[in-house]
Image (spheres, helix red, strand yellow):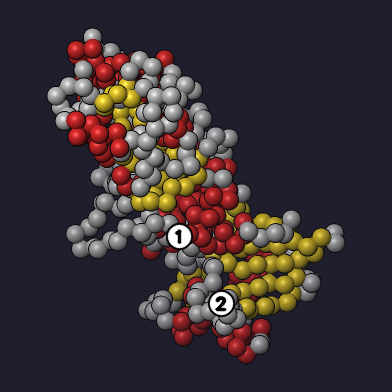
Amino acid sequence: MITVKFPKRNRLLQKVFNTIQVHENHDDSLLTHKEDVLDVILANLGFTSNEEIEIEVSPKYNQDGRESKEQNGQFITIKYFKGGEPGIHYVFFSYEFPQETRNGYIIAKLPISYRTFYNDNHKNKSFNIFLLCVTPNEGMDKNDETVYQDSVTSFSQVSHAVNDYQTFAYKICRTLNINIINYNQLDWSLNRANEVDAQTPFRSVKKMKDFRNKMVRLNNKSSYIIENAEDTILYGKTFGNNGFEIILMAAAAKAITKGKVYLWQIKDTNRLKTEDRDAKPITTENLELLRKIGIECFDELRDYTPNEEALKDGDARSQAEFMKNLMTKYGSDEKKCYLCNCNIQKMIIASHIHRVCDINKENIPFEQKRAKAISGDNGLWLCANHDKLFEYGLIYFDENGLMQVSNMNDLTDEQKIYVSSITMANNSDHHSVVIEENLLTEKMKEYLSIHRHRTHPELN
């Protein structure tokens, strides 16, 4: 006996299988397209034609016990016993008209289904995708559920042309060990990615990053990845399907790297004039999923930071890489000002000690400039107040890493008292801030010396 469980209210599965009527009439004979779709799925999962099948259509309930009107995930579950052990297959359905949606085809609905799968306690479980491809009758209203059941002519591979983005989505799925049941039906005529095998998972973050970068339009401020041998940081747009895509990219990155994976949420600043796009963070449920997987997520939305990795010459600045290195150096639980412990995220700045504008003027190879500009030893997390005080040399650090307030005529006595009052002592011997010994590396001492001599040449 196997039990195939359908959600009652999912729009797509209602259109294909007539689930609401099956549930309300307690009659699984009303299930439509069983032979076209369900039998194909069962056969591909290894079930024989003589299996006894029980159909179950279940609504979703609120905590108060009332039926929820929310749509369920776009998947069915198949529960079975094998060798006396229970098991479960999740089967997710793609969008039915793949050429009408570029990245919503799989990406948009997959995270909610994957989240349910990930939290499932079954020891034997698998996640699968059925590429649902519908050939409608001419003139069929694709949004009219009342005529949908009788208007579909077939579920075929005819419109399953695979473009580059869909190839990327398939490879992300395979990286997460998600199987594509009817992969062999794909038509590669629109694939321009050197006919990459979509069934092959990404083997490294670099390969995933390089593949996606090839698809990014030059004028598109897209989500992107920065990575090195130790850690990976994702800058993810959260508007629309971008927010779902970055969830899967982050999960895939964690699956193929031993290092830490960080996720920054960024606002969609590439807005069309006709659109009013409200910047919204990734949902709490999806953030919880990523944290369970082991990804360190930051809750606040950040303004878009350009991906300077593509730069070959010119400005050595790479703020994304610089911030990642600061997180590695000072800890990634939260960003907070090193001088006052302010943790209001919108006020915290990744502050350079040796300015990038000065680094750019040095007569050294560009690679060395970039190394200085992104070094964690060349920076501090500072609040907006302390960032400006430090930039102008109103505060600085001596050769022992002890913070000093300028004795020049830049500040009045009253202002010096104010600076001290907003600075939290972390060393009782000095009654001031001193950079911790384990952080005060020789390289950091060099950068602090450059800053000190720039802002206070009298100390030379």
Which of the marked residues, 2 or 1, is nearer the chain's N terminus? 2
Where's residue 444, x and y in %?
A: 38, 20
- Mark 1: few, some, or many residues within 10 Å (few <14, many ≥20)? few
Residue at screen point 48% across, 35% down: 331
Q: Quadrant of the C terminus?
A: top left
The label number, if any, that marks residue 322 in the structure image: none
The residues bearing labels 2 and 1 have C-alpha atoms spaced at a distance of 18 Å
Q: Quadrant of residue 184?
A: bottom right
Three-letter amino acid code at disc 1? Thr
Residue at label 1? 283
In the depicted view, which residue is nearer to us: 320 or 175?
A: 320
Q: Quadrant of the N terminus?
A: bottom right
Where's residue 144, x and y in %?
A: 42, 81
Residue at label 2? 62
Dot 1 falls on a residue whose secondary structure is loop
- Mark 2: few, some, or many residues within 10 Å (few <14, many ≥20)? few
